């Protein structure tokens, strides 16, 4: 895959960081409260070498912070940073797309812990209030 990290398009730059499924699933699990290597490995069924690389990349890029929770033996946990917490709406937008366009049978559902209602995300433009995708867009090159 080409290096997209220097592209002028912020979608391309962001995909360079979290554009693979493992990174997004690690962030999903971190939002669900998982913090430890073994928790991520068990939840995802991911090879330890791949998990190590993804956790390192997410930490290096500032979406996760590595914190020591045990000195003997040395053990670290991975907690969401502000940037990592800000990624949750992206995950829910992907899930909403999947709910509409992929098979809906036997899928995980997400609920608001306080109200008990199922989360049905809508991405809107802050200025117009219009749902994204309902109005034409224009892409402008950097100046």
Image (spheres, rainbow, N blue to C red):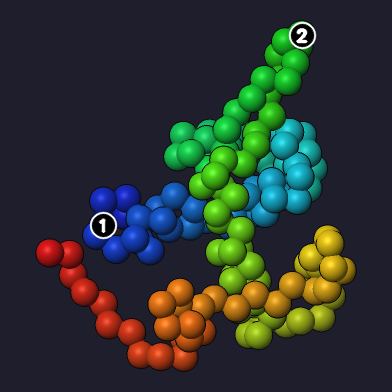
In this orientation, which residue lies closer to the viewer: 18 or 118? 118
**Where does the C terminus fall, quadrant-wise?**
bottom left
Residue at the spot 65% in from the left edge and 85% down from the top edge: 100
Visible in this render: residue 71?
yes
Q: Is residue 36 above or below residue 6?
A: above
Measured as percent of width and height from the top left, residue 72 is found at 76, 8
- Please tell me whether residue 136 is drawn above or below residue 88 in the rendered image: below
Nearest the eye: 130 or 119: 130
- Residue receiving disc 2: 72
Q: Which residue carries the number 1 mark? A: 7
- Secondary structure at badge 1 equals loop
Q: SS at mark 2?
A: loop
Asked if residue 33 lies left or right of residue 58, the reply is right
Image location of residue 3, percent across then percent down: 31, 51
State whether residue 108 appears in this view.
Answer: no
Q: How many badges with numbers are in the image?
A: 2
């Amino acid at each position: 895959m080409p290096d997209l990290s220097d592209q002028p398009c912020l979608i391309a730059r962001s995909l360079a960081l979290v554009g693979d499924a493992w990174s997004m699933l690690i962030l999903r699990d971190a939002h669900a409260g998982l913090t430890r290597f073994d928790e991520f490995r068990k939840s995802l069924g991911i090879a330890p070498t791949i998990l190590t690389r993804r956790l390192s990349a997410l930490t290096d890029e500032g979406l996760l912070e590595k914190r020591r929770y045990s000195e003997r033996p040395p053990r670290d946990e991975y907690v969401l940073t502000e940037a990592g917490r800000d990624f949750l709406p992206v995950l829910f937008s992907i899930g909403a797309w999947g709910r509409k366009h992929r098979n809906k049978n036997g899928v995980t559902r997400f609920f608001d812990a306080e109200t008990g209602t199922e989360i049905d995300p809508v991405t809107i433009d802050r200025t117009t209030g219009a749902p994204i995708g309902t109005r034409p867009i224009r892409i402008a090159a950097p100046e």
